[in-house]
């Protein structure tokens, strides 16, 4: 898999960003992020889509980038 989705600052004890799932394309990664955000906003009434979506990002895996 070429790209990894991360959730910013979700690891305990300030260990960094949590790796969520790997994908072959950024299109798949963005669809995954949208789905996660939609689920969270649906079930957590205190979360807003506009701010929550900024907590996720996609990074290219250096060792798997070909």
Image (spheres, rainbow, N blue to C red):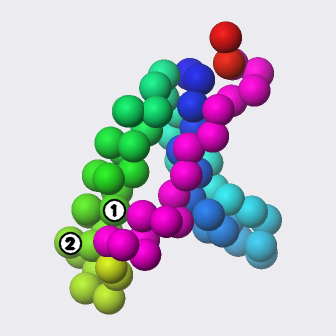
Q: Quadrant of residue 3?
A: top right
Q: Earlier in the sequence, mark 1 or mark 2?
A: 1
Residue 58: x and y, percent?
56, 44
Is residue 53 left or right of 55 when viewed as pictured?
left
Looking at the image, how many numbered discs can be counted on the residues? Answer: 2
Q: Which residues are magenta?
A: 49-64
Q: Residue at x 66, y 68 (%)?
A: 9
Q: Secondary structure at mark 1?
A: helix
Return the x and y of residue 22 as percentages of the image width and height: 53, 33
Q: Is residue 59 magenta?
A: yes
| Gap in angstroms between the C-alphas marked 1 and 2 | 8 Å
Name the residue tied to disc 1. 37
Q: In this rendering, would 62 be left or right of 42?
A: right
Q: Residue furthest top?
A: 66
Numbered label attached to residue 8 = none
Residue at 32 percent of width and 88 percent of height: 46
Question: Dot 2 lies on which element?
Answer: helix
**How many C-alpha atoms fall within 10 Å of the one at disc 2: few (<14), some, or many (≥20)?**
few
Residue 61 spot, x, y in % from top left: 68, 30
Occupied quadrant, residue 63: top right
Which quadrant: the N terminus? Answer: top right
Category of crowding for the residue at label 1, using alpha-carbon neighbours closer than 10 angstroms: few (below 14), some (14–19), many (at least 20): many
Residue occupying the point 69% across, 19% down: 64
Look at the picture and state if 46 lies above or below 4.
below
* Image side of residue 43 versus residue 17, left or right: left
Q: Quadrant of the C terminus?
A: top right
> Which residue corresponds to the image point at 32% horizontal and 53% vertical from the top-left?
34
Of all residues, the one furthest to the left in this rendering is: 42
Mark 2, residue position: 42
């Amino acid at each position: 898999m070429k790209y990894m989705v991360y959730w910013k600052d979700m690891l305990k004890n300030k260990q960094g960003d949590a790796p969520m799932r790997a994908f072959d394309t950024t299109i798949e990664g963005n669809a995954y992020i949208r789905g996660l955000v939609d689920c969270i906003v649906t079930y957590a009434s205190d979360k807003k889509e506009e701010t929550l979506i900024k907590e996720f990002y996609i990074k290219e895996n250096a060792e798997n980038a070909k």
